[in-house]
Image (spheres, grey):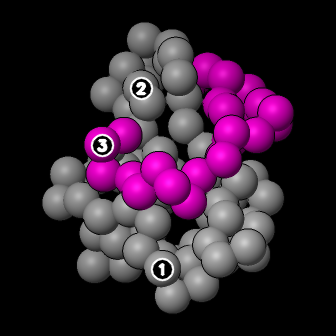
Amino acid sequence: MKAIWNNQVLAESDETIVIEGNHYFPPNSIKKEFFKESNTHTSCPWKGQASYYTIDVDGDENKDAAWYYPETKEAAKPIKGYVAFWRGVSVEA
């Protein structure tokens, strides 16, 4: 699977985990140069508190377009640290 935005591959892996229709990419599969930490956080009743990244490709920013769970609740342990995408980021095989 590949995560693509602005014609740039942001992450690529054969080992994504699909939860609620979202592909979660292993932390070592993301191209960190395109990811900037965000102060945004949201809460999921069964996964825990999500943190976000803003995607930056060639100076174009996509605010909070990626999220991950640095710590998870017990039911979501398999995706701890894994990164998922939305807001126009295309995830495709």
In the displayed structure image, the side of residue 1 where residue 45 appears, left or right: right
> Mark 3 = which residue?
28
Q: Which mark is residue 80?
A: 2
The residue furthest bottom is 7
Q: Which mark is residue 90?
A: none
Q: Which kind of residue does numbered mark 2 sit on?
A: Lys
Q: Which residue is mark 1?
A: 8
Q: Is tag 3's residue or tag 1's residue first in the polypeptide sequence? A: 1
Specify the quadrant of the image occupied by residue 34.
Answer: bottom right
Q: Determine whether, in the image, residue 41 is placed left or right of residue 67.
A: right
- Is residue 60 a member of the stretch shown in magenta? no
For the point 37% across and 20% down, which residue is it? 77
Disc 3 to disc 2, C-alpha distance: 12 Å
Question: Could you tell me residue 93's position as x and y percent?
Answer: 28, 78
Residue at 52% of width from left, 16% of height from top? 71
- Circle nearer the viewer, 1 or 2: 1
Do labels 3 and 2 touch, CB within 8 Å? no
Q: Secondary structure at mark 3?
A: helix
Please report the bounds of the magenta region as a residue range.
27-53
| 59 left or right, relative to 1 | right
